[in-house]
Image: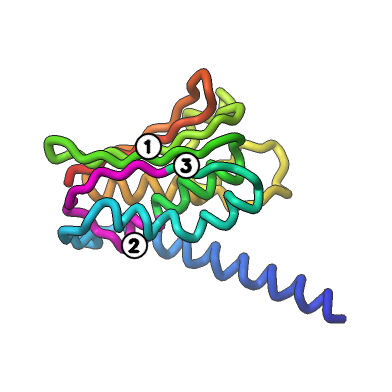
Amino acid sequence: MTETLRSVDAEVQRLIDLSNALLDLEELGGTDHVTRAPVGLAGLVGTAVAPHLRTAARSGRALTVEAADTTVDVDARWVVPAIGNLVGNALRHGDGTVRLTATADDGLLRLRVTDEGHGFPPAFLPRAFDRFARAEASRTGEGSGLGLAFVHAVATAHGGTAHAENSAGGATVTVDLPC
């Protein structure tokens, strides 16, 4: 009975998370839902990465962060979970070291997350940022297929872009935001 209740609780939490993700996407799709404010880039990135440090350590993987010591003008409420989604995806679906770099030059914030895995399946790349898009053929894996859609929505709401690609050493997702 206890195991059944735990299973039901986990499924209910998954549905709540899915509902919240869909609500966030709808909110971001509207107008005037981004409130920019100056924020320290290193602190912003640190806040986003902190929840993933334990996951990386438990899996024996390195998670490196390079963030410029500067201030950017973004909506931290949205950018922090977007960075978290990118790092979480790289840890869940990639291999090797996950690297996050955050730079700000000439009014452009560039967030880049790379891993050393096999990269995205080539057929998946054109639809990587679509809602409910998932690279694996099975529907039994973790995730709802909304993480990269959320990242794209955050980028678009800030007037920026998001791009996914494969490199010789794994997958790379780049988000560029005017700041």
Task: Name the residue rendered at 39%, 52% in the picture.
Answer: 82
Q: Which residue is mark 1?
A: 112
Task: Name the residue rendered at 59%, 35% in the picture.
Answer: 96
**Residue 169 x, y percent position in the rendering:** 53, 23
Span colored in magenta: 65-81
Amino acid marked by disc 3: Asp
The reply, left or right, for residue 89 in relation to residue 36 is: right
**Residue 175 x, y percent position in the rendering:** 33, 39
Secondary structure of the residue carrying tag 2 is helix
The reply to whether callout 2 and callout 3 are in contact (CB within 8 Å) is: no
Q: Which residue is mark 3?
A: 130
Question: Which of marks 3 and 1 precedes in the sequence?
Answer: 1
Label 2 CA crowd tier, 10 Å (few <14, some 14–19, many 20+): some
Of residues 153 and 58, the one nearer the viewer is 58
Question: Which of marks 3 and 2 precedes in the sequence?
Answer: 2
Label 1 CA crowd tier, 10 Å (few <14, some 14–19, many 20+): many
Report the residue that reaches farthest toward the left. Answer: 106
Question: Which of marks 1 and 2 precedes in the sequence?
Answer: 2
Of residues 132 and 42, the one nearer the viewer is 42
Name which quarter of the figure residue 105 lies in. Answer: top left
Q: Nearer the viewer, mark 1 or mark 3?
A: 1
Secondary structure of the residue carrying tag 3 is loop
Label 3 CA crowd tier, 10 Å (few <14, some 14–19, many 20+): some
**Residue 146 x, y percent position in the rendering:** 50, 51
Amino acid marked by disc 2: Glu
Q: Which residue is mark 2?
A: 27
3D distance between C-alphas at marks 1 and 3: 19 Å
